[in-house]
Image (cartoon, rainbow, N blue to C red):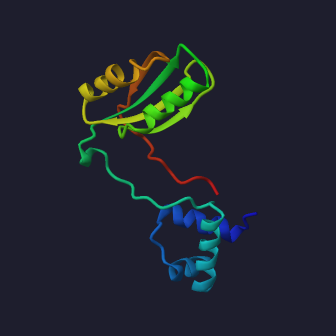
Amino acid sequence: MLDEIDKRLLAALQKNAHLTAHQLGEMLNLSPSQAGRRRQRLEAEAIIEGYTARLDPRRLGLAVQGFVQVHLGTHGPEHSASFARLIANRGEIVSAWTMTGDADYLLRVYCEDLPALNRLIHEVLLPHKAVARVQSQIVMDQLKRDSPLPT
């Protein structure tokens, strides 16, 4: 069970994962050792899954962000597992979800340009034996970046 201090610690770390135990202690009105122990406990309990750096896709040459809806024509555990393996090995697919509704999967992709997105769709996704069709939406502008989870 998370108490209010845990929630404040998680909110602070989501904004800046580089905070030291000393800085966290000051923010939470705890000693550095208490703050450090709380962080370690949240890591051990897998509430904190890890730490990452947020990169600017444009500076990496990834000019196109898109969402691709994938509709399967054939369903079954073997087809789902095969499709999951396919997308797991593609770096341009940065997240994937199974969905309710019309589409079976929603993929978030970053590509260097439109021809790269076209190749991903026509040379990787559509040839998969279970895929019936895909629909893509290209992001024109991102109004809100991925933000911290509510605590």
| Residue appearing at x 40%, y 25% in the figure | 137
Residue 71 image point, x, y percent: 51, 18
Count of marks, rendered view = 0
Q: Is residue 74 above or below residue 115?
A: above
- Quadrant in the picture for residue 10: bottom right
User: Residue farthest to the front?
Assistant: 78
Q: Residue at x 63, y 67 (%)?
A: 44
Q: Look at the picture and state if 63 lies above or below 73.
A: below
On screen, residue 111 above or below 48:
above
Where does the image place residue 103, in percent across and percent down from the top left?
A: 55, 21
Residue displayed at 57% across by 25% down: 78
Front position in the image: 6 or 79? 79
Q: Nearer the viewer, residue 13 or 28?
A: 13
Horizontal arrangement in the rendering, residue 105 relative to residue 77 (left or right): left
Q: Quadrant of the N terminus?
A: bottom right
Residue farthest along the right direction in this orientation: 1
Horizontal relation, residue 53 to residue 62: left or right: right
Q: Position of residue 13 (x, y in %)?
A: 53, 66
Question: In the rendered image, which quarter is residue 122 located in?
Answer: top left
Write down the quadrant of residue 104 in the picture. Answer: top right
Of residues 9 and 42, the one drawn nearer to the viewer in this rendering: 42
User: In what quadrant of the picture does the C terminus appear?
Assistant: bottom right
